[in-house]
Amino acid sequence: MLNRRVAIASFVFVFASCCLVNHAQAQKNEARSLLPVQISGKWGYINKSGIVVVAPQFDEAAPFYSGLALVVTDARGPYVGYINESGQMAIKPRFWQVNVFFEGLASVETCGSWGFINTKGHVVIFPEYIEVGRFSEGLAAVKISDRTEGEQTGEPKWGFVDDSGEVVIAPQFDYASSFSEGLAKVGITNGSETKWGYIDKTGQFVIKPQFSLAGDFSEGLADVEVGGRLEGNVHTGGKHGYINKTGEFVIKPQFASAMEFSEGLAKVRTGEEWGDGKWGYIDKTGRMVIEARFSEVDTIGRDCQNFSEGLACVVVDEKIGYIDRAGKLVIKPQFDVAGPFTDGIAAVALGKHAIESGVNHFVRIGDKWGYIDKTGKYIWQPSK
């Protein structure tokens, strides 16, 4: 889950996904008084009026969360620290891989193992885990060997710890995600097949593993896939629908792909999973309320495709714009990468380039980044 270096890509910071986990629903709409911008190759911060308040001085810079922002002072040896909103170093750079703060704790990597620090930079959960997720609803998923006998170490499994570091759900799952609305999706693998279900905070299954893919609960519903299979490295053949917290389908499986509900609507794809299908939006009855006419959004993360503050990003003629809940284009398609609106502002980019991210895999990211308000007006012209 957290196996890439934060400091390698500017887009990671601009989109607030520097934590290298999925965007957190709990913090997606957190008001942020300062925004990172790049000027002549260095990063600083502006306020929401577009005035520079922290001079450009960092090789990388992330948005603020919980009053702190990740920064890299020297990309040649990219240890990552945290600054406060005065631009002062609050936690000195000493970590190679880090996360943003969730519920007052941030995951950090030391000597190949993961633990957690508090907002003062103190280690509160000793780095001993293979991988970790973010804290959500008081718990974090951690990956740990289930037993050690002499030099024989058991197969790593996922469990959950509380904010004191105590293991409250024993490692037993092959995959695990953060808690959302009281439930966490977990995967159990048997041979080459993984089935997904949902547990409560006692670690008991409330929805048994039965789905080929599963999403987090949002607004009382979760998108799940049935009938899917893994062929080589490609997942194919399934249909997506939505279940409630008892595991009952309230919207039957019928879509090639689906996203979580946000502001009462969810983005779904019609047609075949790898075919020429289009994206539209449904309500909680499964009715298509915004016609499936949009192409895939080529962007980082999925948040801007979900409605946030009444707007969602869509692609028209290979450019990204924003629609309202009626499906009307209110900000014309003109961007190459885009983020969700948070506190009335969205990050957008012009131009693209590629960056290596893993073996034979490239991520397309923005070249020049700026910010717009909900009318589409720039509060900061794209710069680099």
Image: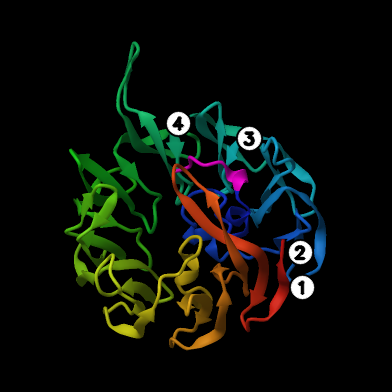
Q: Is residue 4 magenta?
A: yes
Q: Earlier in the sequence, mark 1 or mark 3?
A: 1
The overriding secondary structure of the stretch rendered in magenta is loop
Q: Nearer the viewer, residue 6 or 94?
A: 6
Q: Secondary structure at mark 4?
A: strand
* In contact (CB < 8 Å): disc 1 and disc 2: yes
86 versus 347 height, above or below: above
Residue 129 circle label = 4
Q: Which quadrant would residue 340 be assigned to in this image?
A: bottom right
| In contact (CB < 8 Å): disc 2 and disc 3 | no
**Kind of residue indicated by mark 2:** Ile
Q: Residues within 10 Å of mark 4 (few under 14, many from 20)?
A: some
The residue indicated by pointer 2 is 46
Q: Is residue 309 visible?
A: yes
Q: Left or right: where does residue 88 sit relative to residue 374?
A: right
Q: Can you give x and y, in whole percent of width and height, for residue 247 in the image?
A: 21, 61
Kind of residue at badge 3: Phe
Helix, strand or loop for disc 2 = strand
Other-residue count near label 2 (Cα within 10 Å), few / some / many at <14 / 14–19 / ≥20:
some
Dot 1 corresponds to which residue?
Answer: 49
